Image (cartoon, rainbow, N blue to C red):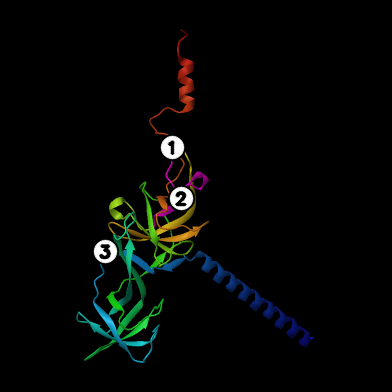
């Protein structure tokens, strides 16, 4: 009898522990669903990027460096232990649309960050948050956080412009890539603005007012300067290239002016008119 009771008690404890584990897993999954997704900004367009130093050498001879590697810096400013800097690469000019040699700006690629660990005759640092291969000779800029929440918002301004091209040196842009825009804060663009890349009905690339807009990609603004912006392609149904049209994703539902009479009011007024 006593043995049977112990077996039943052990079985109940096992079931309780199993249910508790399932509940914990469910909470963890739910917590994961509630977390706002984010991305790391990889590219921006800039007219000029001021360098504050370079990666001069590495502790181990290696062509490609990554997180946790120890490097030595040549700085153009005083630094202290704990200071952080962002590593970047100038990939080259972004072509100005409609020109042969005109430049819309410089394509800047972020590679990772470094944290100063020792300051003596030479500045020693350690790489962290590497998102691409880092090399000696890569330049440094003041640190800034590149983590951006993916939370597109409805824009407040009606803005239309052109895609300058993919951020990466390639011809076609698509989902989960960065692209550059020919509009900036001076034109009314804001961080997290939701945009559409669009064509006209029947696939026409030309702007023809009598054809409807057909949205082919959804973007979110992730970096803005006065004259240009960088956007992230949230999704696309087809690829697009430099020269493609974009617009802010304004609601298409139109509301009546509250001062205008409604249909019912107009109908009542008509009924109240005296017979002619």
* Marks 2 and 3 in Cβ contact (< 8 Å): no
Left or right: residue 185 compared with residue 63: left
Q: Spatial distance from mark 3 to mark 1, Cα to Cα? A: 41 Å
Q: What stretch is highlighted in magenta?
A: 192-209
The quadrant in which residue 177 appears is bottom left
Q: Crowdedness of circle 2 by 10 Å Cα count: few (<14), some, many (20+)?
A: many
Q: Is residue 130 magenta?
A: no
Residue 195 in view of the camera: yes
Q: What residue appears at the point 65 percent right and 77 percent down from the top-left corner?
A: 18
Label 1 belongs to which residue?
255
Across and down, in percent, residue 13 comes to: 67, 80
What residue lies at 46% left-to-right and 38% top-to-bottom?
A: 210
Q: Distance between the residues labelled 2 and 3?
A: 27 Å
> Is the residue 90 above or below the residue 230 in the image?
below
Circle 1 packing at 10 Å, graded few (<14), some (14-19), many (20+), is few
| Sequence-first tag of 2 and 1 | 2
The residue that appears at 43% across and 67% down in the rendered structure is 39
Q: How many labels, in total?
A: 3
Image quadrant assignment for residue 65? bottom left
Q: Where is residue 251 in the image (x, y as percent from the top left)?
A: 44, 45
Mark 2 or 1: in front is: 2
**Res 80 seen here:** no
185 shown above or below 6: above
Quick one: SS at disc 1? loop
- Residue 195 % position (x, y): 42, 53
Which numbered tag is attached to residue 198?
Answer: 2
The one of 46 and 153 positioned closer to us in this rendering: 46
N-term-proximal mark, 2 vs 3? 3
């Amino acid at each position: 009898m006593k043995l049977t009771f112990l077996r039943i008690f052990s079985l109940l404890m096992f079931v309780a522990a199993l249910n508790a584990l399932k509940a914990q897993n469910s909470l963890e999954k739910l917590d994961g669903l509630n977390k706002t997704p984010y991305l790391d900004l990889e590219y921006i367009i800039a007219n000029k990027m001021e360098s504050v130093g370079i990666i001069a050498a590495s502790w181990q001879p290696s062509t490609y460096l990554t997180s946790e590697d120890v490097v030595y810096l040549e700085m153009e400013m005083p630094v202290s232990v704990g200071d952080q800097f962002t590593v970047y690469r100038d990939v080259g000019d972004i072509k100005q649309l409609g020109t042969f040699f005109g430049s819309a700006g410089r394509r800047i690629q972020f590679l990772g960050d470094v944290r100063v660990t020792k300051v003596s005759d030479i500045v020693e640092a350690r790489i962290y948050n590497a998102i691409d291969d880092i090399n000696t000779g890569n330049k440094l800029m003041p640190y800034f956080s590149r983590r951006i929440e993916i939370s597109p918002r409805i824009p407040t301004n009606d803005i239309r412009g052109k895609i300058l091209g993919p951020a990466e040196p390639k011809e076609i842009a698509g989902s989960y890539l960065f692209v550059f825009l020919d509009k900036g804060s001076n034109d009314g663009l804001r961080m997290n603005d939701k945009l559409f890349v669009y064509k006209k009905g029947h696939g026409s690339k030309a702007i023809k007012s009598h054809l409807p807009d057909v949205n082919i990609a959804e973007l979110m603004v992730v970096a803005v300067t006065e004259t240009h912006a960088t956007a992230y392609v949230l999704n696309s149904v087809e690829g697009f290239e430099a020269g493609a049209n974009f617009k802010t994703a304004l609601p298409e539902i139109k509301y009546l002016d509250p001062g205008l009479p409604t249909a019912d009011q107009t109908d009542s007024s008509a009924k109240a008119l005296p017979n002619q």
